[in-house]
Amino acid sequence: METDRSGETAINIPETKANAKGKAPLAVSSKAMVEQPKRGLKKGIAICDFLLRLCALGAAIGATATMGTTNETLPFFTQFFQFQAQYNDIPAFEFFVIANAIVAGYLLLSLPFSIICIIRPYATAPRLLLVIFDTVMMGLTIASASASASIVYLAHNGNPNTNWLAICQQFGDFCQKVSGAVVGSFIAGSILMFIILLSAFALKRS
Amino acid sequence: METDRSGETAINIPETKANAKGKAPLAVSSKAMVEQPKRGLKKGIAICDFLLRLCALGAAIGATATMGTTNETLPFFTQFFQFQAQYNDIPAFEFFVIANAIVAGYLLLSLPFSIICIIRPYATAPRLLLVIFDTVMMGLTIASASASASIVYLAHNGNPNTNWLAICQQFGDFCQKVSGAVVGSFIAGSILMFIILLSAFALKRS
């Protein structure tokens, strides 16, 4: 009877036996065995998050630098005016430079928090902090990129309905660099979106 | 023996056995006491999520309808042309209408999943699904709103550097309605951002 009982409990649920004997060492070790791969998974997500943050940082810095340094002066000029195009001729491009600089700064400052998440995969406070600011920064990045994209589209194609002429025939080099910067910013925004989804998976109760 | 066995199978769940032996009932009940307010908190977050979704739905539908129905015909016309402004004169506004309609449709379809989250506050699968699509839709909303905002700014102020003239002197009514639609879309985007943050809190391991 006693062997039958212990056999039955051993087969069904190991913890039960340990509890019945008032010890529970087995429960701890089996729980630890389950926790181990989950801890590894969470650590993997945290390392992925760190690497993606570095990529987004590169994209944001590249976009800011490209947009900020683009400058084209046309080789001909009239008596009153020399034709020149810079980012601060158009308010949307100014916003682009400011927003992407802010995002790049934030991503740099977020790296230590990301490292904390690697070291302590179960800490939720730094991860929640990162998710909150990541969401705001993703909004900022995408807003600046698409505001500039609509101006770039206008510069390329113009709009006959509103009588806005395309300027890319004259400022071809300027337009190309600006388009590149917008693409870089969209890449940074997409990476931030992916980081948020990763964080949601990491926050999930296991 | 038979009754004993059936009794054994009935008490295969660990807690039951512990209770039967008079061990650790305190742990179980105290855990239940801790769980109760957390369950209430999660349910509150889920209800909040549902209400915010309704608000965002209203904002998105309002923005789509305002932008889609705006139409202004000027009372004077030349021999060749009658001056008229509609949303599909400008590609950014077309994108705005399409994107906001998609977001409104998504928000409507997400309501049942939000209700599932209210009924089962601990279910992570529907919540993760919602977070993933919410993030994408937030990006879409903010992208469309800011692309249109930069065109609206141009329509209001013009840009002397690129020789794009303001059109709002002529199409004042059109410009005002379009500005309202952009504001509505930004409100929908902000509410979606808040929904994502709420979901992150709800997903957090308690």
Image (cartoon, coloured by chain):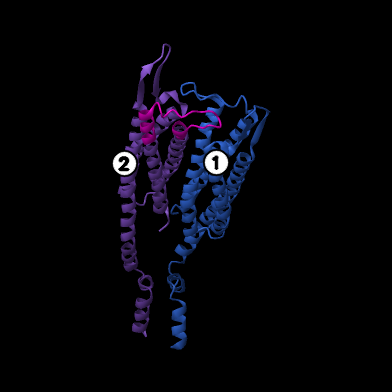
Chain colours: A purple, B blue
What residue is rendered at 50% in x and 61% in y? B32
Q: Give the answer, above or below, for where B147 lies relative to A7.
A: above
Q: Secondary structure at mark 1?
A: helix
**Between marks 1 and 2, how big is the CA–CA gap?**
35 Å
Question: Is A113 or A102 nearer to us in this picture?
Answer: A102
Q: Secondary structure at mark 2?
A: helix
Task: Tell me where the magenta segment starts and ends, as one range.
Answer: A153-181
Q: Quadrant of the N terminus of chain A?
A: bottom left
Q: Position of residue B77 (x, y in %)?
A: 66, 28
Q: Which residue is mark 1?
A: B94
Extreme residue in the top direction:
A79
The residue mark sitting in front, 1 or 2, is 1
Q: Position of residue B19 (x, y in %)?
A: 46, 71
Residue B201 in sight in this render: no
What residue is rendered at 44% in x and 73% in y? B13
Q: Amino acid at mark 2?
A: Leu
Q: Is residue B156 left or right of residue A147?
A: right
Q: Is residue B174 left or right of residue B198?
A: right
Q: Give the answer, above or below, for where B57 lies relative to A106.
A: below
Extreme residue in the front direction:
B79
> Which chain contains the residue that carries disc 2?
A
Q: Is residue A151 magenta?
A: no
Q: Is residue A176 magenta?
A: yes
Q: Which mark is residue A54?
A: 2
Q: Position of residue B105 (x, y in %)?
A: 57, 51
